[in-house]
Amino acid sequence: MVRAVGKRWGSAKSLREFMSRKKRAWLPWLGATLILSGMLCGLAFRSARHVPSFYRDAVALSPDQQRPSSDHFLQRIADLVSALQREGHWEIQFAEQDLNAWLAVDFLENHGTVLPSQVTTPRVHFSPGRTTWACEYEAPLATVVLSLAVEPLLVAENELALKFVHARAGSLPLPLGRLLDEISRAARAAGVTLRWSVHDGAPVAVINLTPGSPGEWAYVLSSLSLEEGQFTLSGHTSRIPPEAVPTVPSTLVTNPPLNPNKNSTLADPLPEG
């Protein structure tokens, strides 16, 4: 057996030379693979550390600079509450600058503990038809900026659709499944009517805003619009007659077909699971 091996390779020296040639042939490929892997890891790390420009600008301001805008946002909320308590039409605008100031000042001072410990400095950006939320997240290896883009649409009066366009860590895409599960659980716990659909491949949550009970105020949201830097809501308030038939609370429906009217573009059911 030893002689057969020796005959095949000539000698142990020939075997070593053969292996050496093979090694030299594979070394460039191995080196190129390692270099490419390092470049990809570096690119992924850099992408994860990407910070959206709106977020960088929003967190650059100090709390003292933003306190007047925070107070203005609180005043706008008070104006909305006051308008809702009067019969008739109402309309209100919220500026992105004011909301971000409130997040930086009043929310942080009085409500910051509602956030998980790893999540800090939430901010928002309003653009035509879309709102993007972002925050810093303390990951094990580095702090990254998470962002979520949502497009709200009023399908009908008091029927609000929220299209979840994408979630990202830096500029890297993140799966939406866990977030959608949390939204469904929160809606179920709050008794909110919620159903799911799909539009252009993106999940859509459709929420029924119940008008109220007999003898109470009925709040009807009739329009909403998102423009660059501002968000506008309008609707009307009326008193529900005491003799009106009470609204039976709806139950939470999980992932049914939406079956919209002919003017709606939300048609496909969200797949189960």
Image: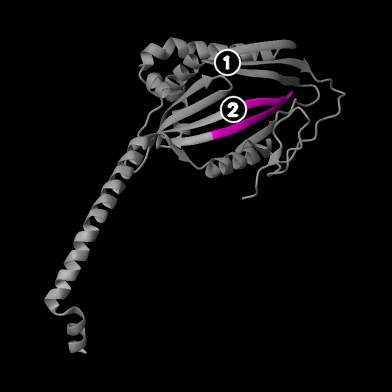
Circle 1 is placed at which residue position?
77
Q: Is mark 1 on a helix, strand or loop?
A: helix
Residue displayed at 69% across by 40% down: 268
Q: Does the magenta stretch include residue 209?
A: no
Left or right placement of residue 264 versus residue 77 in this view: right
- Residue that carries the numbered disc 2 in the rendered image: 151
- Report whether 265 appears left or right of 51: right
Residue 258 drawn above or below residue 60? below
Which sits in the foreground, 149 or 140?
Answer: 149
User: Residue 164: within the magenta?
Assistant: yes
Residue kind at label 1, given as amino acid type:
Ile
What secondary structure predominates along the stretch shown in magenta?
Answer: strand
User: x%, y% of residue 84?
Assistant: 68, 15
> In the rendered structure, which amino acid carries the disc numbered 2?
Glu
Residue at image point 50% right, 10% down: 72
Badge 2, how many Cα within 10 Å: few under 14, some, many 20+? some
Q: Residue 259 lies in what quarter of the image?
A: top right
Give the extent of the magenta segment.
152-165
Task: Estimate how packed mark 1 is, as few (under 14), some (14 to 19) or many (20 or more) residues with alpha carbons within 10 Å.
Answer: some
CA distance separating discs 2 and 1: 22 Å
Quadrant including the N terminus: bottom left
Answer left or right for 120 relative to 132: left
